[in-house]
Image (cartoon, rainbow, N blue to C red):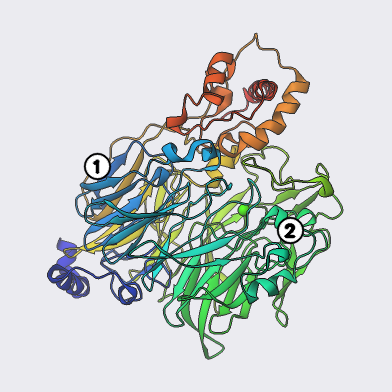
Amino acid sequence: MRELMIRGALAAAILLPLASHAAAPTVVDDAALGDQTQGHNWLGYGRTHHEQRFSPLDQVNAGNVGKLGVAWSLDLPEDRSLTATPLVVDGVMYFNGSYARTRAVDAKTGKILWEHDPKVFETAEDRARILWDWNRGVAYWKGMVYVATPDGRLIALDAKSGQEVWAAQTFEPSKPLFISGAPRVFRDKVLIGNGGTEWGAARGFVTAYDAATGKQAWRFWTVPGNPADGFENKAMEMAAKTWTGEWWKFGGGGTVWHGMTYDPEFNRVYIGTGNGSPWNQKMRSPGGGDNLFLCSIVALDADTGEYVWHYQTVPGETWDYNSNMDIVLADLVIEDKPVKALMHAPKNGYFYVIDRSTGKLVSAKPFGKVDWATGIDMTTGRPIEREGARYEDGEEIVWPGPFGTHNWPAMSFNQDTGLVYIPSIEMAGVYNDKYTKPQAWKSPDFKFDPGVDFLRADGPADWGSSSLRAWDPVQQKLVWEVPTPGVWNAGTLTTKGGLVFQGRADGKLVAYAADTGKVLWDISLGLGISAPAVTYAIDGTQYIAQLVGWGGSMTATGGNMAAQHGWSYGAQPRRLVVFALDGKASLPKMPAPVFAKPLHDAEFVVFEELAERGSFVWKESCGMCHGPAGTAGGFAPDLRASAVMLDKKALHQVVFDGALRARGMPNFKDVSEGDLEAVQHFIRREAHKQQLNTP
Ligand code: CA
């Protein structure tokens, strides 16, 4: 409190809006979501409609951040992956955890006010095999909280009670799709898309629902369907001219699983579209073509969902370079001209500044190691691809790989420094389609098969590296960079206090000086952090909130790269930790990192031929959760260390009878007896091989 009195002038700026909220609760509408000046609430996924994740709060600042301490914490023992951005409305925090369980918590004390469990496992049945459990956030609008479940439901909850008001099924349950993203709200509508494309034929779309009733308002498909069925609109007719072959049989792709931004100035919504279904263009659209609107930013009229403009970052995509990453709006001055800018750093490694009034590219420069293209032609806005990048001549190492130079962990934009803070990855992909016959390829059905191999087996722990990059979007250049551990670090928060916060793969939450990247404060939270921090204020105190719970695709599929931190499945409890200046609360102790020790069984004789067959079954059905070659990244148990793999009866009960379904292990009734045995031989081979390799 002493700090607060010294900084009285600054505190007054925080107290003013608080005084008004005490009198009247905040009406969360477009005016509130568009207001960048208020700091006590965090109303939307990217804080405001602009998605800058820049807070005007400055009570915690570069001068005093060293005094940050724990104000309160809340253990979440039933949760697994925590990736969400919590929202804060008038002193109440709303966030979701695993399987879209949503909680409302008193943001000053941590007291749980209500919980809502959509009971995903009761509705998902066998499709649960493609349901990663994480969820990136809820939305709030006029007293209602909106949550999208992995099995495709959009649910409206009363913010006071947590009671369900309405629910809509957003895609056909028979389709191999899922939702991990946060809905967006604007103009009394809730917008949601979905993920997919790697587990079967998927055609991307977004749907807007009436916020009060759940009635569908509009839907926009991102890629054309079969022309014989007619086109939904002129945009689809235009897009179809950029496809060849019978793409609709494979879905085409372009799912909208993450980035969506409402622009209050133009009353438009910008959606970031996904990669192809399948990734490999040789199967999807064998005669080439740009394949609109894959890997694009598409601007839609917010009221009608009608196409306005698009910019495609990867024409004819064939590497999983989706453009689903966050879409940030800001007013920039470039070459003395004001620009209504849209900033986007997709997987492909280029940082794009687009004039959002027209959709025209302003500038694009690589912000990491990129070699699929040598640059962007500014007259056409198209990438200049290098020869061989499309693995047309066989196996090809391409930078970046499918995890991208930037994935969904959010970047933030600081209005004072003018810098964008990007959690960056440096990792190549080894693309190879010689094992698949393009003509004979068929879409999988709830099995992993993107139509190309990108890494035959697991890479070493140092296959990828990462850093936090401060990028100047006007000059398109790197201003500072600090290395970060491993490859999978969380999104960033930046504040008027001259700070950047980032949670990291090694379990540290770090505060950097926004202008120089100097480390000003850090704390070890004992578990890998994958969620972005947020900040808010109550009664004159600024808080920083951080969900601690290793999650996201890298924790499931990253193998050795993810396993290196020791966040072993079930070892460390998940937690919400909230900080304030001079916070004095203590945290319950976290168990130390655990590294899986492959079980030894001298009697098990591995048949190499069976193990080899098992490696393919593993890749299709097991590896996306348990790790690409047996080393698990923490999301699911490491089966080299599992006694179940040595006990045929137990294995049957788990795989065929759903014995561990409640804990997240789906049924795989379609795996044959012989294939299961092959998997067993595969995992025992890996256990023997890697027994001496674990740290
Ligand atoms: Ca993808």
Q: Which residue is mark 2?
A: 247
Circles 1 and 2, Cβ within 8 Å, touching? The answer is no
**Outermost residue, left side:** 23
Q: Which residue is mark 1?
A: 586
Residue at x 46%, y 43% (from the top left corner): 133
Q: Is residue 647 above or below residue 380?
A: above
Q: CA distance from mark 1 to mark 2?
A: 56 Å
Kind of residue at badge 1: Ser
Q: Position of residue 32 (x, y in %)?
A: 30, 74
Q: Is residue 335 visible?
A: yes
Q: How many marks?
A: 2
Q: Which mark is residue 570?
A: none
Q: Is residue 278 visible?
A: no
Kind of residue at badge 2: Trp
Q: Nearer the viewer, mark 1 or mark 2?
A: 2
Residue at x 54%, y 56% (from the top left corner): 467
Q: 199 or 612, which lies in front?
A: 199
